[in-house]
Image (cartoon, rainbow, N blue to C red):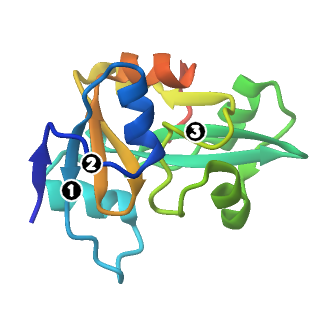
Amino acid sequence: MAKKSKHSEAGTGAILALQKAGITPVIHTYEHDERAQAWGLEAAQALGLDPARVFKTLLVSHEKALAVVVIPVASRLDLKAIAKQLGWKKAELADPALAQRTTGYVVGGISPLGQKKALPTLIDTSAATHETVFVSGGRRGLDLELDPQVLAQLTKASFAEVAK
């Protein structure tokens, strides 16, 4: 069962990052199913949302460089577009263990907010068409709802067509 709360829930870097920026987080929680493999789609379904408004956070790499990409949960990365946006020759999905170490979050709960290390960030342009979007709050079963412009500002992100 999904719940919505305007009250902060201590514990994740994402929530703390919003609070530090003076933003009261809009928190949505749901019971995560350990058997689920498509965590973003699970969140959309559990929260009764259009998957176009729920975004997943992925890390991409090229040689030793890393970047964060935020795309709708039903979409796939456009690795050629990402590489072009970042000025890389090519991009590939980062190793999950490296993504976890770098962000401080578990795969399936990686938030674009409050990561251990600030990385270049791209948000798919489709986010800007919504009044609010949902991103992971830093663990499975926890999503945060916020204005995509605020998300871009807090992550120092650029909007780009990076999903297909």
Q: Is residue 162 above or below residue 13?
A: above
Residue at the spot of label 2? 9
Check disc 1: other Cα within 10 Å, few if <14, some if 14-19, many if 20+.
many
56 and 145: which is toward the camera? 145
Q: Are marks 3 and 2 in contact (CB under 8 Å)?
A: no
Q: Give whichever of discs 3 and 2 has the lower sequence position.
A: 2
Q: Quadrant of the N terminus?
A: bottom left
**Residue plotted at (52% across, 38% down):** 114
Q: Amino acid at mark 1?
A: Thr
Q: Which x, y percent locates residue 96?
A: 66, 64
Q: Could you tell me if residue 126 is visible in this image?
A: no
Q: Which residue is mark 3?
A: 69
The residue located at (57%, 49%) in the rendering is: 58
Residue located beneath label 1 in the image: 29
Mark 1 vs 3: CB contact within 8 A? no
Query: Residue 29: x, y in percent?
Result: 21, 56
Q: Residue 155 versus residue 83: which sits nearer the camera? A: 155
Q: Are marks 2 and 1 in contact (CB under 8 Å)?
A: yes
Q: Amino acid at mark 2?
A: Glu
Please tell me which residue lies in front, 13 or 137.
13
Residue 80 seen by the camera: yes
